[in-house]
Amino acid sequence: MNPSRLICSMAALVSAAAAQAQTSKPNVIVIMTDDVGYGDFSCYGATRMSTPHIDQLAARGTRFTDAHASASTSTPSRYAFLTGEYPFRRLGTDVAAGNAGMIIKPEQFTLADLFKRAGYATAAIGKWHLGLGSKTAQQDWNGQLDQTPADLGFDYSCIMAATADRVPCVFIENDHVKNYDPSAPIQVSYRQNFEGEPTGKSNPELLQLQPSHGHDMSIVNGISRIGYMKGGGKALWKDEDIADSIASYAINWIEERVNMAKNAPHCRKGECDHTRRSEANLPFFMYLCTNDIHVPRWPHARFAGKSPMGSRGDAILQLDWTVGQITAALQRMGIADNTLIILTSDNGPVLDDGYADRAEELAGSHRPAGHWRGGKYSAFEAGSAVPFIVSWPAGKVPQGKTSRALVSQIDAMRSLAAVVGEQLADSLGIDSRDHHRTWLGLSSKPRNYVVSMAYNRSVSIRTPQWKYIVPTKGPAMVPWGPHIETGFTSTAQLYNMRGKQGETTNMAEKHPKIVKQLDEQLKKELESPQR
């Protein structure tokens, strides 16, 4: 761990003010789902399936209809959420390989650092996809990783290095592979296969789920992945158990904290250490990232075949179950009323994202992007328009409210800082703005504009009324397989987002002054040098 972070952590633990924080500050859980579209939940209009636990979360809070991620792909979106800095400002924030070095640098201030400063215990659970270790492709998967979420302000982490379709297919607990099996040392490469190891391309007969495009390298659990891996043994995850594992890791950590808090006051002098007693009284922040509904979609038997939309629909049901497990645990432990929950997605939806799971064929009338155009990877709205629910049952957030305010995930840093009573220097979270009253449903004030980065790093801008996409070279459709419009054209695009027009009629020629105004605003955002 970075020494300065260790000193800050120790100071937070022994602080008298922090010891009393539980009584005045809420616990905060961010549930970051994966590749979930605006229209994938029944509270957002889905009719071919029901998501009762997520719907209940919305009923106990405020649901936003115009919320945006900062990118239409995972790694840059998560980078922006945790740092308050747009991903286009830093090189190397594209979709990360499973053996990428850590993309957020230890010296950067993060959302977890904010909560540590405010006297919170912090945890990261589930999908990470922001790199691990100080150097790409040089991680010691069989020993100790030298850079982890601990260097970014997280006290505890139990994470997937990248995504379920990328190796290594193991969970990492803090700085070691969880359940490490010394009889099966782990080797990982994104350059070449290991001698004698089967692949999806060469050995399709070994697969229980066939790839549709790419995803034909190393085989783990009968599913071929991106990248090459050898070993793992007992540490390898089982795809059908990933959701159960993530939920249990999260609940176990919370339960441990609650039990510590219950037992700490009864410790006799000398029987339990001061740090543990202090830590027990801290509120907590959890960054909880589900694997669902990212590919490969291989849900548990409890959900397999339960949706008319195949495994993608089953994965949505599994995601809803995960949310239900978390909220039920909070109720059981008696801390639900003092826990602020934010549920959202890292980017928009995709149906065929590399596996032959019939997601496109079985979607039927279901529109995963809702009324938005495009999808994951895209410059169109569905690339970044995501579900966004804020729930805090203790009377702090209006119940059952629908907000049409334009909001952005980039504002997590400063909005949550305001919620927990922290002030940040201008040099921290440089793109984040305080919109906590809007996030909490207490105001309808929208953001003046949001910006979002497509898969080719082009950036578009959106105001409450207008969407401007800069002239961009590139194919009209995502070229490697997904049937998704990119939004790339050689001419400027301007769309009126009010009324029924949406992104259907390009009005750039009709409103040149608006095009110029938005183009200038976007250039101001892009002027800051990349780091």
Image (cartoon, rainbow, N blue to C red):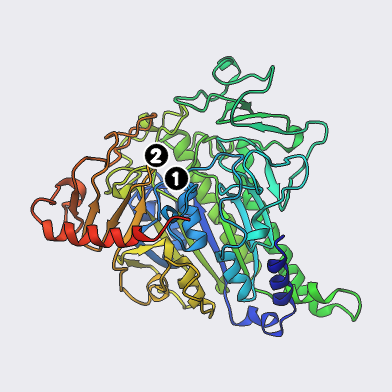
**Looking at numbered disc 2 in the image, what kind of residue is underneath it?**
Val
Residue at 56% from the left image edge and 46% from the top image edge: 129
Q: Which residue is mark 2?
A: 350
Q: Residues within 10 Å of mark 2 (few under 14, many from 20)?
A: many
How far across and down, in percent of the image, does residue 276 sit? Answer: 79, 72
How far across and down, in percent of the image, does residue 102 sit? Answer: 60, 50
Q: Which residue is mark 1?
A: 35
Residue at 56% from the left image edge and 55% from the top image edge: 104
* Camera-side residue of 280 and 317: 280
Residue at 52% from the left image edge and 44% from the top image edge: 292
Image height of 266 relative to 126, above or below: below
Location of residue 13 by image quarter: bottom right
Image height of 101 relative to 86, above or below: above
Extreme residue toward the right, this view: 270
Q: Are marks 2 and 1 in contact (CB under 8 Å)?
A: yes
* Camera-side residue of 434 and 260: 434
**Looking at numbered disc 1 in the image, what kind of residue is underneath it?**
Asp
How far across and down, in percent of the image, does residue 328 sit? Answer: 59, 61
